[in-house]
Amino acid sequence: MKKFKLSLASQIFIGLILGIIIGGIFYGSETAQSVLQPFGDLFLRLIKMIVVPIVLSSIIVAIAGVGDLKSVGKLGAKSLTYFIGMTLIAIAVGLIAANIFQPGAGLNMDKLEHTDISNYVETSEEQEGKTIAETLLHIVPTNPISAMVEGDMLAIIFFAVVFGIGIAAIGDKGKPVLRFFEGTASAMFYVTNLFMKYAPIGVFALIGVTISKYGFASLIPLGKLALTVYGTMIFFVIVVLGIMGKIVGFSIFKLLKMIKEELILAFSTSSSETVLPKIMDKMEQAGSPKHIATFVIPTGYSFNLDGSVLYQAIASLFIAQMFGIELSIGQQITLMLVLMVTSKGMAGVPGVSFVVLLATFSTIGLPAEGLAIIAGIDRILDMGRTAVNVVGNSLAAIVVAKWEGQFNPPLENMKDAS
């Protein structure tokens, strides 16, 4: 008889439901909150513990792994230009949607001043007072080790990018160092998976504390968040990627039809890596030369995560709105730039979105506790953003092939490719 085993997503969902029920039963009970809080705090501390090593190693590997851009030539430069451009557009679309629909607005956090969250509000206000020159200077660390100890994410990112470029520049001499950070990144992704096994308990405790404090009204923004994220993702695929497809003469609907099986698999497993070989093969069949498809798509898995950054932009503003933290245009631009960098090199591992969001939160003073609200439905949102990532990288192979003048679709596909 086959042993029945619940998936992690199912366990987290059960934890969410039980947390909501327990929080509702013990609404207003400080005893229940004091009992549950340590279990929730442990989950946050476990995730916070791996933020610095996973961000540092992932970005170094992503930058150094591209190799010598001179040898990669125009293909590498064009691919990276496209990736950066689409990432910025995806983040901008996410920020605009969050500002328009305000998914986190309307939640009464009247007990905010009695919690540690007020410290984050003060941090946010301090950041608003910084000049552009001070902010730019602060990005460059005088001591990278000190920046890692303090969790200064902007400084860590700057050091990782520069170090990655240095490793790529010295060629064979840098390979041992690159292998070390590849091993570090792999180990940290394993640890992330390990820590996520505790997620159902962490989610149960955190959502239980939230409901017991603020009541069932705190769930309303959760539904608004899901609707905003999925609505914006559909808009991004059909309109933004559709326009890009139209520009290069390849219909987005034709593309979606070609990769529908891969999209279903990626959506159901929340892993874009499971469909990587098939996506490369299908884009080659669509007309993208083998050397372009095999370079652009794997590179895009590190540098072109449109669905992920779009979601993270919305989630960041959702948390800010939920806690009544007003983010200025300058802070939102900073958020856009930080997301653009922190998203690079992040593998498709469940739970990594928490790492990216926490890394982002630390730069603009948002409360990490806000992740408790979205943790329970993160897997549902992860399914959508994974599918968008797959569509974005599939289209990228066609766009770059067209840009290189090497797109060569089979005759039977030429009639319905536009």
Image: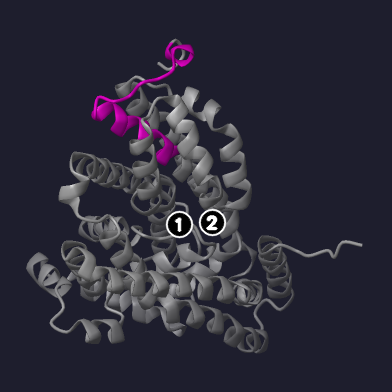
**Residue at the location (49% across, 22% down)?**
254
Q: Which residues are magenta?
A: 391-414
User: Which mark sits nearer the N-terminus, 2 or 1?
Assistant: 1
153 in relation to 85, above or below: below
Query: Callout 1 environment at 10 Å: few (<14), some (14 to 19), or many (20+)?
Result: some
**Tag 2 secondary structure:** helix
Q: Amino acid at mark 1?
A: Ala
Task: Tell me the amino acid under the disc marked 2.
Answer: Pro
Query: What residue do we see at 49% from left, 35% from top?
Result: 281
Q: Residue at x 25, y 24 (%)?
A: 405
Q: Is residue 347 left or right of residue 373?
A: left
Name of the residue lying farthest toward the front: 172
Q: How is the image coloured?
A: one colour
The image quadrant of residue 194 is: bottom right
Q: Answer whether labels 2 and 1 touch (C-beta < 8 Å).
A: yes
Q: Quadrant of the C terminus?
A: top left
* Residue 395 lies in quadrant: top left
Residue 398: % across, % down: 36, 30
**At x 74% / y 75%, what residue is drawn?**
25
Mark 1 highlights which residue?
A: 105
Residue 387 drawn above or below residue 239: below
Asked whether residue 109 appears in the rendered view, the answer is no
Q: Where is mark 2, residue-wise?
A: 221
In the shown orientation, is residue 73 left or right of residue 387?
Answer: left
The quarter of the displayed image where residue 288 is located: top left
Residue 101 place in picture, x, y as percent = 43, 46
Q: Position of residue 191 (x, y in %)?
A: 52, 76
On the question of residue 402 being in view, the answer is yes
Label 2 Cα crowd, 10 Å radius (few <14 / some 14-19 / many 20+): many
Alpha carbon separation for disc pair 2 and 1:
7 Å
